[in-house]
Image (spheres, grey):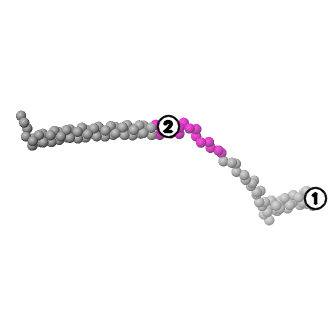
């Protein structure tokens, strides 16, 4: 049996198309596999990075928790001058003056007592 020339060409074209279609399908399937492998690798790396970040955060929290508190120093003592003596009232000043006069012998006991009574009564 002899094939007609047109049929032989058609059969060759069909055979080529089948081979090309099969090759295309295989190539497409391989591309899908590679993409799936790349995606799985990427997800695994992302998961590992997340775990590493979480571990670093946990380590940092533990260091903060167990670190000694910062040392606090007492403020330096305040330097201050002693308060000035209270102002002397005029009555006290007069009594001191009378006492000095009495001690010096200028006033007698009776004169001192009378003058003291006069200053204390406000007169």
> How far is mark 2 from mark 1, CA to CA?
90 Å
Q: Which mark is residue 62?
A: none
- Position of 106 with respect to 77 (left or right) is right
In the rendered image, which residue does mark 2 sit on? 59
Q: What range is drawn magenta here?
A: 55-74
Q: Which residue is found at the position 90% from the left and 60% from the top? A: 101
- Vertically, is 119 above or below 25? below
Q: Which residue is found at the position 31% from the left and 38% from the top? A: 34
- Vertically, is 31 above or below 77? above
Rendered-image quadrant of the C terminus: bottom right
In the rendered image, which residue does mark 1 sit on? 105
Point out the tag, 2 or 1, that comes first from the N-terminus. Answer: 2
Depth check: 28 or 7 in front?
A: 7
- Work out which residue is located at the far top of the displayed protein and give it: 1
Residue 67 point in image, percent of width and height: 56, 38
Depth check: 38 or 65 in front?
A: 38
Is residue 43 located in the magenta-colored stretch of the structure? no
Residue 17 point in image, percent of width and height: 17, 41
- Work out which residue is located at the far right of the displayed protein and give it: 105
Q: Which residue is found at the position 41% from the left and 37% from the top? A: 48
Residue 111 in sight from this viewpoint: yes
Residue 52 point in image, percent of width and height: 44, 38
Residue 1: quarter of image: top left
| Mark 1 residue crowding within 10 angstroms, few (<14) / some (14–19) / many (20+) | few
Residue 18: quarter of image: top left
- Position of 15 with respect to 123 (left or right) is left
Residue 25 in sight from this viewpoint: no
Q: What element carries label 2?
A: helix
């Amino acid at each position: 049996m002899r094939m007609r020339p047109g049929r032989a060409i058609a059969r060759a074209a069909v055979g080529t198309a089948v081979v090309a279609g099969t090759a295309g399908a295989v190539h497409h399937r391989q591309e899908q596999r590679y993409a799936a492998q790349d995606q799985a690798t990427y997800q695994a790396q992302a998961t590992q990075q997340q775990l590493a970040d979480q571990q670093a955060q946990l380590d940092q929290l533990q260091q903060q928790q167990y670190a000694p508190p910062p040392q606090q120093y007492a403020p330096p003592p305040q330097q201050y001058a002693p308060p000035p003596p209270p102002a002397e009232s005029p009555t006290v000043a007069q009594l001191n003056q009378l006492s000095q006069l009495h001690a010096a012998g200028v006033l007698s006991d009776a004169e001192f007592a009378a003058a003291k009574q006069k200053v204390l009564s406000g007169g």
